[in-house]
Amino acid sequence: MDLPVEARVWNRAALESGGANPREGDRALAALLLAHGLVMNGGVHHALEVLSQEEIREAISGFVFFSLAPIGQLLEEAPTLDEEVANQRYWSFIPDDEAIDRRFRVIFRSSLDAFAPLAG
């Protein structure tokens, strides 16, 4: 059974950093998913400790690309916030993976050119 196009693009971002020739949407999704995975694993401060400064900038851009600018702003402010406050703010916007999946699907459908075509 073939996966839907959206799932294949999501998987390419999650598993292949957006693929061999990523476009803006692919790069944004890959960066957002990297940061989100770390936050869900250990919290906002954990993600900021693990990610490089470049990866943090890319994650912020990814959240902005997917109309989640408050999370981008949170990542910028988080070093000055108490860990629990930072986590609560994150989870109030993104309580689970479905919140990101919904935003991805909306942006994907309205901006197909921002994502590289699938191989094959």
Image (spheres, helix red, strand yellow):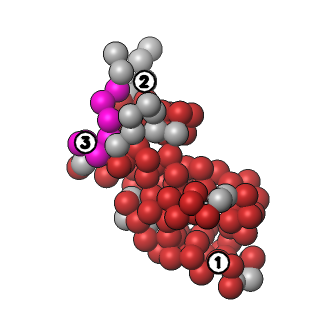
As drawn, 63 above or below 115: below
Residue that mark 1 sits on: 78
From this viewpoint, is residue 103 visible?
yes
Q: Which mark is first along the chain, 1 or 2? A: 2
Which residue is located at x 75 percent, y 76 percent?
A: 83
For the residues labelled 2 and 3, the Cα–Cα distance comes to 17 Å
Which residue is located at x 52 percent, y 59 percent?
A: 59
User: Which residue type does callout 2 highlight?
Assistant: Leu
Mark 2 or 1: the one toward you: 1
Which span is picked out in magenta? 112-118
Residue that mark 2 sits on: 3
Contact, CB < 8 Å: mark 2 with mark 1? no
As drawn, 101 above or below 61: above
Q: Which mark is first along the chain, 3 or 2? A: 2
Using the image, tell me which numbered label, if any, was put on residue 19: none
For the residues labelled 2 and 1, the Cα–Cα distance comes to 37 Å
| Secondary structure beneath label 1 | helix
For the N terminus, the image quarter is top left
Residue that mark 3 sits on: 112
Percent from the top left, x then y, of residue 110? 23, 49
